[in-house]
Amino acid sequence: MTPDNQPSPCAERTAVLADEAATLALGGSLARGLQPALKIYLTGDLGAGKTTLVRGLLRALGYRGRVKSPTFTLVESYNVSSLYLYHFDFYRFANTDNWRDAGFVDEFGGPGVCLVEWPQRAGSALPMPDLTIDLQHAAQGGRHARLRAFSEQGRQCLQALNSPVPPDDESSPACTG
Ligand SMILES: Nc1ncnc2c1ncn2[C@@H]1O[C@H](COP(=O)(O)OP(=O)(O)OP(=O)(O)O)[C@@H](O)[C@H]1O
Ligand SMILES: [Mg+2]
């Protein structure tokens, strides 16, 4: 399912990211709320900062190696801070068949955290995300981030950011799962 045809989020927040350091910091803040099997889908144009955010997240977990963009490898795997993480990039997928042929069903069904760039390129085949992060270029050169939770686990991840997310406000459906 693509982020555009998901049901309503159960928690949401936005952030202004003035520079690359701010994108790295947002990724780092999210690291505090990660738990096994969490699925985070990252959308936004080319160069919007998706890989940068994942880099900040991995650095905050203690990963010291190079965080490469998986645009050509499709996936980069990490085992850090007692978590398995898969960083996918489906930019090169033309349709849902590509995702099925790539054979990532096990990764998406297991305990690893899945961070996915260009999830929309896999069509409707991907499982529902716990959290989506949409990054957009801002007029002043920075980025706007919109984070939306679609499960209780995703909401907890949002809560780990600096200012707390109000619990299930009246306009949002309750988080499940
Ligand atoms: N908040 C920000 N303000 C300005 N530049 C930023 C910001 N966040 C990231 N960048 C810069 O944007 C550039 C592209 O970032 P990145 O590679 O993470 O994008 P991406 O969304 O992963 O792109 P792609 O879709 O091609 O994989 C990098 O040079 C990075 O430093
Ligand atoms: Mg990228």
Image (tube, rainbow, N blue to C red):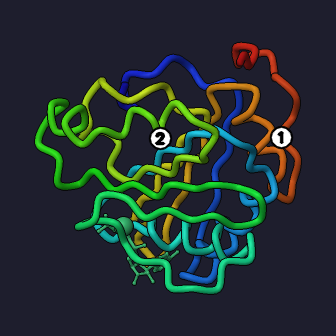
Q: Helix or strand or loop: what does disc 2 sit on?
A: helix
Q: Which mark is residue 90?
A: none
Residue 140: x %, y % from top left: 45, 77
Residue receiving disc 2: 107
* Residue at (29, 38) in percent of width and height: 103
Tell me the quarter of the picture where residue 95 sits: top left
Residue 65: x %, y % from top left: 57, 85
Tell me the quarter of the picture where residue 72 sits: bottom left
Q: Helix or strand or loop: what does disc 1 sit on?
A: loop
Split into 4 quadrants, where in the image is the C terminus? top right
Residue nearer the viewer, 127 or 4:
127
Split into 4 quadrants, where in the image is the N terminus? top left
Query: Nearer the N terminus, badge 2 or badge 1?
Result: 2
Report if the beta carbon of the residue with label 2 is closer than 8 angstroms to ligand 2: no
Query: What residue type is disc 1 on?
Result: Val
Residue 7: x %, y % from top left: 51, 17
Tell me the quarter of the picture where residue 173 sits: top right
Number of residue marks: 2
Residue receiving disc 1: 165
